[in-house]
Amino acid sequence: MADARTLLLAELNRLKTAIEEKIASSGAKASGSAAQSLKVTVSGNEGTLWGASHIRQMEHGRGPGPVPAGFHGIIEQWIRDKGINAEGYAPKGRDASKMTSDQKVRSLAGAIAYTIMREGTALYRSGTPRDIYTEALNESLDRLSADVGIYFADQIQTINDKYSKE
């Protein structure tokens, strides 16, 4: 049987792949930066799956409250990455026919940023998380727990066999 480090590395890579697939299949993917941020590190018998902090928001949404500097620009880029067509957007008090495509995107980004700041994202407001990592993490922990149990049982058996022969 493989050693604990090998088991951990394999399971973390399996979890990473599962999360990448969930991001892609859930419709949460925009630029791909969340999936690209996933990195596995293993040192000794300890391992970590690193990822961008906004992966949590991909599953649960973002609540209302203060927004980071440049949030309007982040939302504008998100609109572009998602391929959202802002042509049909008509902001209050403005003649949309006199706006360029870029102005419509900027205006829509401002409206979305304002709504998120005041009310949170639609996913957050729905109260129903989108499974991006929870199920995969629980399955991974179950597999890892079973594999480590088997690994240590084998190690104990090896020690018992050694001493029973003496």
Image (spheres, rainbow, N blue to C red):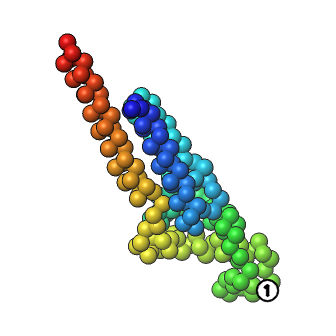
Closer to us: 67 or 127:
127
User: With respect to residue 140, does 118 lie above or below?
Assistant: below
Name the residue at the front extreme.
Answer: 165
- Residue 52 is left or right of residue 31, and the answer is left
Residue drawn at x 47%, y 74% is: 119
Q: How many marks?
A: 1
> Quadrant location of the C terminus?
top left
User: With respect to residue 34, does 79 lie above or below?
Assistant: below
Residue drawn at x 21%, y 23% is: 160
Q: Quadrant of residue 151?
A: top left
Mark yes or no: residue 57 visible. no
User: With respect to residue 108, does 70 lie above or below?
Assistant: above
- Residue 160 is left or right of residue 1, and the answer is left
Name the spot of residue 91 as percent of width and height, x first.
Answer: 67, 83
Residue drawn at x 71%, y 83% is: 88
Name the residue at the top extreme.
Answer: 166
- Residue 108 is left or right of residue 103, and the answer is left
Q: Which residue is mark 1?
A: 97
Rate crowding at label 1 as few (under 14), some (14 to 19) or many (20 or more) other CA atoms within 10 Å: few
> Quadrant location of the N terminus?
top left
Name the spot of residue 35 as percent of width and height, x first.
Answer: 58, 53
Secondary element at image label 1: helix
Name the spot of residue 65 as percent of width and height, x first.
Answer: 46, 66
Mark yes or no: residue 131 visible. yes
Amino acid type, residue under disc 1 in the picture: Ser
Closer to us: 148 or 83:
148
- Residue 109 is left or right of residue 95, and the answer is left
Q: Quadrant of residue 81?
A: bottom right
